[in-house]
Amino acid sequence: MKLPFESENISRDTIAHISKTMTTKLVGKSLENVMNLGEMTPDDQVELLASNEEKWFYLWAIEAQNAGLIRNLDVQPDSWELIPRQSVQITETKITRGGKETETTKDKFLFHPHKYTADYAFFIDKYFTDAFWPHTGYIVVDTKGDYMTRGSTAEFSINQKLMLQIHGIYVNKIIPSDLFKKTWVPVRCRYTPVKKDEKKLFEGLPGIAEFLRMK
């Protein structure tokens, strides 16, 4: 039995969303569309990402894409709507100058739509790691640090469940340091920025060339 997020069971809205956001194989062009970065180099682009976790994953994904392991890398793809705008119909009664009673119905706004924006999305055509689910196909990623506050954990968990229920898409929570242990360490993450010493956190972990040789 296929799961809801596998190809033929994905909703039409989701397929349209994928078609809109995954239209290029070049990450630089994707970033230009999503983040209005123009013709900036990947080195410039990575500095604009919000957190170290996003930067680390981006550097990993660039190496993966260059090696042909993933394709159509998209940074901060278009948001998915999880809960639509909320409003109620109310009836107002007014008395005209002539003493006649009239009723009008109005739409009273309550809440804005609730939307979710992932950090990354891409495709895997051939299985190479169990770090993502599903192992192949359309992959959506939310990068997290080793420590998350209770509030942010709860919010992500709710968004994750709604994404699967409504759009048939499983959102992968990825902690880059754990991903590196399962795969490889990107070159730019391995060394300290000034002295270029190897970080103790990554000692003994393979680079992408060694990972590919082992596969």
Image: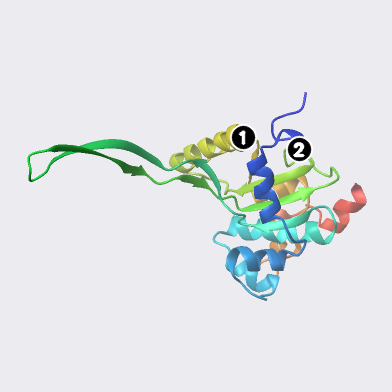
84 lies left or right of 208: left
- Compared to 176, does 47 lie above or below? below
Image x and y of residue 3, in percent: 72, 29
Image x and y of residue 22, in percent: 71, 55
Image x and y of residue 120, in percent: 65, 53
Q: Identify the residue at image location x=62%, y=55%.
A: 77
Residue at the far front in the pictured view: 98
- Compared to 167, does 18 lie above or below? below
Q: Identify the residue at image location x=56%, y=51%.
A: 79
Residue 87 in view (yes/no): yes
Q: Identify the residue at image location x=42%, y=43%.
A: 85
Location of mark 2 (residue): 7
Residue 194 in view (yes/no): no
Front residue of 41/2: it is: 2
What's the CA distance linking mark 1 and mark 2?
A: 13 Å
Front residue of 214/164: it is: 164
Location of mark 1 (residue): 164
Q: What residue type is labelled 1?
A: Leu
82 lies left or right of 139: left
Q: Which of marks 1 and 2 is in front?
A: 2
Marks 1/2 in contact by CB < 8 Å: the verdict is no
Graded by Cα atoms within 10 Å as few (under 14), some (14 to 19) or many (20 or more), the crowding at tag 1 reads some
Q: What residue type is labelled 2?
A: Ser
Q: Quadrant of residue 102?
A: top left
Graded by Cα atoms within 10 Å as few (under 14), some (14 to 19) or many (20 or more), the crowding at tag 2 reads few
| Secondary element at image label 1 | helix
94 lies left or right of 165: left
